[in-house]
Image (cartoon, rainbow, N blue to C red):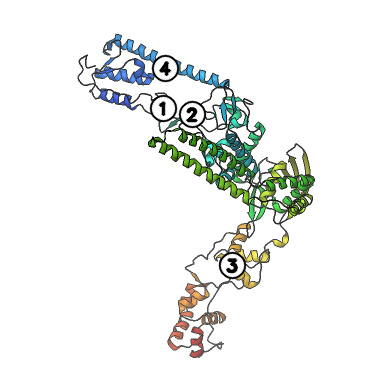
Amino acid sequence: MHALGWGEVEIIDCDLGASAAIGSTAREGFERILSSVALGEVGIVASREASRLSRTDKDWCRLVEVCQIFGTLVGDEQQVYDLSYLDDQLVLGIKGTLSVIELKVLRQRLQEGQEAKARRGELFKRLPVGYIRDATGEVAFHPDRRVCEAVQLVFAKFREVWSVRQTFQWFRDHDVELPANPICGTRLVWKIPSQSLIRDVLRNPFYGGAYVWGRRPVETLLVEGRLEKRQGAMRRADECRVFIPDHHPGYIEWATYEENQLMIRRNSVNREADESMPAVRAGQGLLVGLLRCGHCGRKLHVRYWGARGTHARYLCKGDYDDGGQYCIGFGGALVDRRLSQELLRVISPLGMEASLRAIEELAAGDAAQRAALTNKLKQLEYEAQKAFEQYDAVDARNRLVAAELERRWNEKLQETEIVRQRLSNLQEKRYSLCSEDEARIRLMGENFAKVWNSDRCPPILKKMLFRTAIEEIVVRTDAKKETLQLTIHWKGGVHTQLEMERPRSGTDTATPMEALDIIRRMAVRHGDDQIASVLNRLGYPTGKGKRWNQNRVATARHNYSIPGQKRALPDPDRVSLSEAARVCGVSHRTIERLVEAGLLNRQQLAPRAPWEIRRSDLDAEPVRSIVQRLHRTGKLTLQGGCPEEQPHLFIEIKGDDNARHHE
């Protein structure tokens, strides 16, 4: 450009390698060119070819229009164009259109070639850990046995604990390393796995022997007026653009992979809008996630009641969210017990086999951890030997190289010693079963029902057994909702029909009607604490024979839809006995004498309930005069409340007695 006579030349190359496709980030360099031309600071815009500038039709038309308005020339390797001439506009327009079409054709061909290669199952950016491509280009297991056993251990532990997080915690707690593909480089890196690494391994369909492409498609979205490209949600393997089952040898069967995905989806409460909570947790409800309503098809969820929150109740919410009512609801204890009996009837013959399996696992102890450490020790011994050979081969006089190789050798020796010590500690802690222990385990297999009903059998273990044997339980009620009809779908495809009486609350656990009447009358103005005090003084127990307290009154109001409040509502027009005595400056007994003499009115919603006295009655005659005379003379003279011809019941009370009451 200097040779053509231009004095100031500015090169803008910040857009190199940046895409101009729809939804991509803004082209800062191109925007800078447009703004400079619009300010009249540019005499010519030069590029090697039109495609360097155009990229898209929209950008090319904007550039040509701005250059035409401000008289800026456009040049390429062939010639310089003056956009004030129609011929130059026509030529530049054709060149820009051809360059855009060329880019689109090239991109389309590349994408079609990539997809065609993927449909053949030959497109690999990076193989998952545990796989390599052999000399013939076929996918095969990694030749390192340590790598293969580590990957297999992930799937084995997941099938044992049924949870991604529990699998991750086992690897973390036992310091068992897994191989991972580094971000840079091709050599595998061994490290304590993160939870995301465990989840990626378990969710990758490649380990099930299937080839999948297009699992997370790119979507173009309009965000705040701008088009942006974002990766969509991860699709299921069989919903992807390319899905080739039995493409290569897998670490697990495809059926096992699908079962694992079902477990993962069930364990997550955020992935799918399912009202049930089918993950294996520590609650007492044994059938959580297995029950399905036979009327509406929804999953039943569980709620826990009782003082300790351990009594399970299964509910199908039906159209409750839309203002309707629950479809099915029943207590869980009797149903769990009945289904447990049916499960024991089916699996009890397998108790002996389970005992033998338990003996094998206890005898093996931490076999998985020992195997992982053994493989790691062999790898470290090889690396230490290799480091020694490199150190031994170097000239000892070359201290710069020899010192570094010696340091590497010492590091490998230290790592080897640490792993050897850990392996030795595991061997010392290994528990060996004696003949008495084996006999006890065999006896447990023969009496499996006693083990199941024992308090030491955890609910989590029972839930896992239910989910292992049962696929689903469909429950429905009769027209009168007096019986439950249960259909058990076993894993093997067999179905069992059961019928039992629908569990319901007994009449002896209902709140007494007299207590409910008092609660209704007092809840208008009084608080739950005052109501509980009145019920206890009157001798009314709760439905379960317990004393009333604030929480139990609130629960009764909630169960019977009685409005109320925790604390009494303030009423400026009414006061209690204590407040009346405080307002008048007298004792409680003085107020009681005024009420007994008929001089002061009071209200009481229930026996033993707090008194309600109007403030206006305290300021009215004859109460005001009597109280003033009491303060002046120290004597309580009850006058003014009876006719003059009627003799007074109480004439006066000595001041000492009144003073004592006043105190």
Q: Which residue carries the number 2 mark?
A: 219
Of pointers 2 and 1, the one earlier in the residue sequence: 1
Of pointers 4 and 1, the one earlier in the residue sequence: 1
Contact (Cβ within 8 Å) of mark 4 with mark 2: no
Contact (Cβ within 8 Å) of mark 2 with mark 1: no
Circle 4 residues within 10 Å: few <14, some 14–19, many ≥20 = some
Disc 4 vs disc 2: which is toward the camera?
4
Q: Which residue carries the number 3 mark?
A: 531
**Residue 437 relative to residue 88: left or right:** right
Residue at x-position 38% and y-position 19%: 55
Choose top left, top right, bottom left or bottom right for residue 566: bottom right
Q: Residue furthest top?
A: 87
Contact (Cβ within 8 Å) of mark 3 with mark 1: no
**Residue 460 relative to residue 79: left or right:** right
In the foreground, 199 or 474: 199
Of pointers 3 and 1, the one earlier in the residue sequence: 1
**Residue 476: % across, % down:** 73, 44
Rounded to the nearest whole Å, what is the CA distance between mark 2 and mark 3? 62 Å
Rounded to the nearest whole Å, what is the CA distance between mark 4 and mark 2? 21 Å
Could you tell me the amino acid type at mark 4? Leu
Secondary structure, mark 3, is helix
Secondary structure, mark 2, is strand
Of pointers 2 and 3, the one earlier in the residue sequence: 2
Residue at x-position 42% and y-position 25%: 22
In the foreground, 100 or 77: 77
- From this view, report whether residue 210 is shown above or below residue 654: above
Could you tell me the amino acid type at mark 1? Ser
Residue at x-position 54% and y-position 65%: 525
Q: Which residue carries the number 4 mark?
A: 103
**Residue 457: % across, % down:** 70, 53
Q: Which residue carries the number 1 mark?
A: 24
Disc 3 vs disc 1: which is toward the camera?
1
